């Protein structure tokens, strides 16, 4: 009976290790921030300097699209 418990414990550890390593090597998601989203920009509505993101935290204005983007 003790061997059965050790076997079950070993299988659980192997499974959790597999889940851990699978989560480390997953492909990057397309919905994650682009490098251009990390750049600082000035809000055209209120003039606030937004340091990170695509939306002004004060007025809610979205970052204007760059000439090469849609």
Image: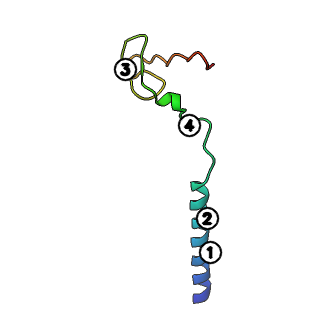
- Do labels 4 and 2 touch, CB within 8 Å? no
Q: Quadrant of the N terminus?
A: bottom right
Q: Quadrant of residue 10?
A: bottom right
Label 1's element? helix
Q: Is there a contact, CB below 8 Å, between mark 2 and mark 3?
A: no
- Residue under the point 57% across and 88% down: 2
Residue 39: where, in percent of width, then height? Answer: 45, 27
Q: Mark 2 to mark 3: distance in Å? A: 44 Å
Question: In the shown orientation, is residue 5 left or right of residue 50?
Answer: right
Reading the image, the residue beneath label 3 is 49
- C-alpha span from label 4 to label 2: 24 Å
Percent x, y of residue 37 = 50, 28
Q: Which residue is mark 1?
A: 11
Point 49% across, 18% down: residue: 62
Q: Earlier in the sequence, mark 3 or mark 1?
A: 1
Name the element at disc 3. strand
Query: Which comes sooner in the sequence, label 3 or label 4?
Result: 4
Instruction: Specify few, some or many for label 1: CA neighbours under 10 Å numbering under 14, 14-19, or 20 or more.
Output: few
Which residue is located at x 61 percent, y 68 percent? 15
Residue 42, above or below 4: above
Mark 2 nearby-residue class (10 Å; few <14, some 14–19, many ≥20)? few
Q: Earlier in the sequence, mark 1 or mark 4?
A: 1
In this rendering, position of residue 3 left or right of residue 64: right
Q: As drawn, which residue projects farthest toward the top?
A: 45
**What is the crowding at mark 4: few (fewer than 14 residues within 10 Å), some, or many (at least 20)?**
few
Residue denoted by label 2: 18
Which of discs 1 and 2 lies nearer the camera? The answer is 2
Give whichever of 58, 50 is nearer the camera: 50
Q: Quadrant of residue 43?
A: top left
Which of the pair 8/57 is nearer the observer?
Answer: 57
């Amino acid at each position: 009976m003790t061997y059965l418990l050790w076997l079950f414990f070993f299988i659980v550890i192997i499974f959790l290790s597999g889940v851990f390593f699978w989560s480390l090597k997953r492909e990057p998601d397309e919905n994650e921030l682009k490098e251009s989203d990390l750049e600082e920009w000035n809000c055209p509505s209120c003039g606030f300097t937004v340091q990170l993101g695509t939306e002004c935290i004060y007025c809610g204005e979205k970052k204007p699209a760059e000439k090469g983007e849609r």
